[in-house]
């Protein structure tokens, strides 16, 4: 499932994050790539332990914690601290798959079930830079508005096309879901959306809605990691 989520950051958060990352000490992005990814990666990245990245990452995490669509789709158990990258002057990231396990700076080892890219620049300010995600026999090209995010399986092959004008700046991170299997997460997500729709139509106390909500939580209880 590839999910686009609008308005993850509000205007004030977006302005603050952009100010922080603009002032940050950009470095070669290959420093944090795995062996295979480093062969395809050509961009700049904020060091994950710099003050600017930490503060901006905290803003992103706070926004994610209140975003109900993200919570329903990802069922996050652990979120890798958000990172920040910049593509300009022909930078690109060739076709690759993300590492299965990412060591966080606090010692946690996070399984990458889902990948996320949160766009920080308006798409009309740069040319190229599309995130292309291969989904079976088709490819999805994603280039979203500033403050919008795409969430997609970390198992997919994906790439960032060359940026030929301006700069593409984004936050990216990974999610270890409470439910590791993608097809189970999709079932729960569909159920959650149906519950929310029914709640608006029949109210919280309708017997069928109560039963459906119970079934959702029993499945989550069954499938969630301990």
Image (cartoon, helix red, strand yellow):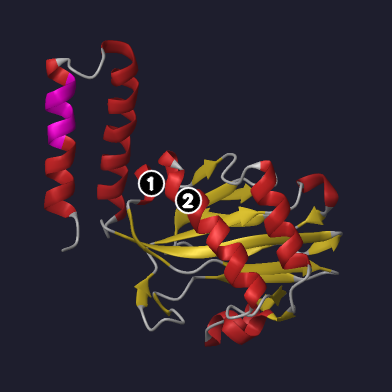
- Where residue 71 is drawn, which disc sits there? 1
> Vertical placement of 22 versus 62: above or below?
below
Taking the spot 38% from the left edge, 46% from the top edge, the residue there is 71
Identify the secondary structure beneath mark 1.
Answer: helix
Q: Position of residue 200 (x, y in %)?
A: 34, 17
Name the residue at 19% across, 62% down.
Answer: 225
Q: Kindly indicate the quadrant of the structure image that contains residue 194.
A: top left
Q: Is residue 87 left or right of residue 226?
A: right
Is residue 140 among what the camera can see? yes
User: Residue at the top extreme?
Assistant: 202
**Does residue 143 appear anywhere in the picture?**
no
**Which residue has dot 2 on it?**
64
Residue 116 location, x and y as percent? 52, 57
Distance between the alpha carbons at the discs numbered 2 and 1: 8 Å
Q: Position of residue 186 (x, y in %)?
A: 32, 44
Tag 1: Cα neighbours inside 10 Å, few (<14), some, or many (≥20)? some
Label 2 close to label 1 by CB (< 8 Å): yes
SS majority, magenta: helix
Please tell me which residue is depicted at 66% across the width and 63% down the height of the picture. Answer: 160
**Quadrant the C terminus occupies:** bottom left
Magenta span: 209-215
């Amino acid at each position: 499932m590839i999910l686009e989520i609008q308005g993850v950051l509000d205007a004030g958060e977006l302005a603050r994050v952009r100010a922080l990352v603009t002032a940050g000490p950009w470095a070669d992005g290959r420093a944090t790539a795995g062996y295979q990814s480093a062969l395809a990666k050509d961009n700049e990245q904020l060091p994950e332990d710099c003050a600017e990245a930490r503060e901006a990452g905290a803003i992103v995490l706070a926004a994610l914690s209140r975003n109900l669509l993200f919570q329903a789709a990802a069922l996050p158990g652990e979120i890798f601290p958000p990172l920040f990258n910049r593509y300009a002057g022909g930078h690109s990231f060739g076709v690759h798959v993300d590492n299965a396990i990412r060591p966080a700076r606090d010692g946690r080892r996070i399984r990458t079930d889902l990948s996320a890219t949160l766009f920080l620049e308006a798409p009309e300010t740069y040319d190229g830079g599309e995130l292309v995600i291969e989904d079976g026999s088709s490819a999805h090209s994603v280039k979203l508005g500033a403050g919008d995010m795409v969430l997609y399986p970390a198992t997919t092959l994906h790439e960032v096309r060359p940026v030929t004008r301006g700069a593409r700046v984004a936050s990216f991170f990974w999610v270890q879901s409470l439910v590791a299997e993608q097809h189970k997460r999709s079932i729960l997500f569909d159920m959650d959306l149906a519950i929310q729709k029914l709640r608006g139509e029949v109210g919280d106390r309708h017997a069928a809605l109560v039963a459906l909500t119970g079934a959702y939580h029993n499945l989550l209880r069954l499938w969630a990691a301990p």
